[in-house]
Image: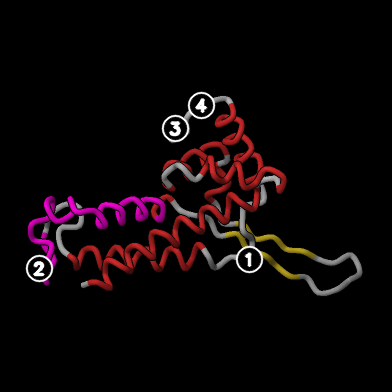
Amino acid sequence: MEQLFVSALMLRLGIEARLFEYIEAELPNEKRREQLMRISEYQASKLLARLTRLNPDAKEEVYVKLTPVDGGASFGLRYTPMTDSLASIHGRLGELLHFNFFIKNPYWYMADRVDYPGLPTVLHAQDLIEQGIRELAEATSGDLVSHPQFRAAVEHVIEDLDAGNPLDPG
């Protein structure tokens, strides 16, 4: 049982880490630390929603083929995006990691899947963790840390933060 909750926490942190790898790669070096501290106050799903709204291409996987001018062999690089589904899993894992989970799900301990909304049993939570692991493995399988057009979206977020505007995914 303990391993389930540890796995949920580790997966949640892994999802956050990948999202911030995407963002960090786009921030200018001279203000990177300051800007990361300001951005990291937000939930992964809200920040992802804002960034992908500013740049819808950031939701798409990208293959970049490079061919050296000297005639060398071509090679490809791939960007794999953080998906809405994975950002949602981040939030749902948060539900699992709070005491209120046990109050909302009185049958949490059952070794059977029941037809209730949310994560009514640990088996449902295990399914969510397995799905999250698969999706995070895909999100980290690319060679590029960010979408080639992600820089403009991050700059818009920084401008909004500097202007005192809250991040709003809607």
In space, the residues marked 1 and 4 are separated at their CA atoms by 33 Å
Query: In whole angstroms, how far apart are the C-alphas of marks 4 and 2?
Result: 45 Å
**Which amino acid does the dot numbered 1 rest on?**
Asp
Residue picked out by circle 2: 110
Residue 64 percent across, percent down from the top left: 69, 60
> Which residue is labeled 3 in the image?
168
- The stretch of residues the image draws in magenta is 86-114
Residue position for label 1: 143
Q: Nearer the viewer, mark 1 or mark 4?
A: 4
Give the distance between the C-alpha atoms of the residues marked 2 and 3, in whole angstroms.
Answer: 38 Å
Task: Name the residue located 27 percent from the left edge and 66 percent from the top edge.
Answer: 5
Whether pointer 4 and pointer 2 mark residues with C-beta atoms closer than 8 Å, the reply is no
For marks 2 and 3, the one nearer the N-term is: 2
Q: What type is the residue that disc 2 sits on?
A: Met
Q: Which of the two labelled residues, at mark 1 and mark 4, occupies the earlier sequence position?
A: 1
Give the alpha-carbon distance from disc 1 to disc 2, as whole Å.
Answer: 41 Å
| Dot 2: element | loop
Q: How many other residues sit within 10 Å of disc 1, few (<14), some (14-19) or many (≥20)?
A: few
Three-letter amino acid code at the position of disc 4: Asn
Residue drawn at x 62%, y 46% as measured from the top left: 150
Rounded to the nearest angstrom, the CA distance separating label 3 from label 1 is 30 Å
Q: Which mark is residue 165?
A: 4
The mark nearer the N terminus, 3 or 1, is 1
The quarter of the picture where the N terminus appears is bottom left
Q: CA distance from mark 3 to mark 4?
A: 9 Å
Classify 10 Å Cα crowding around label 3: few (below 14), some (14-19), many (20 and above).
few
Q: Closer to the camera, 158 or 51?
A: 158
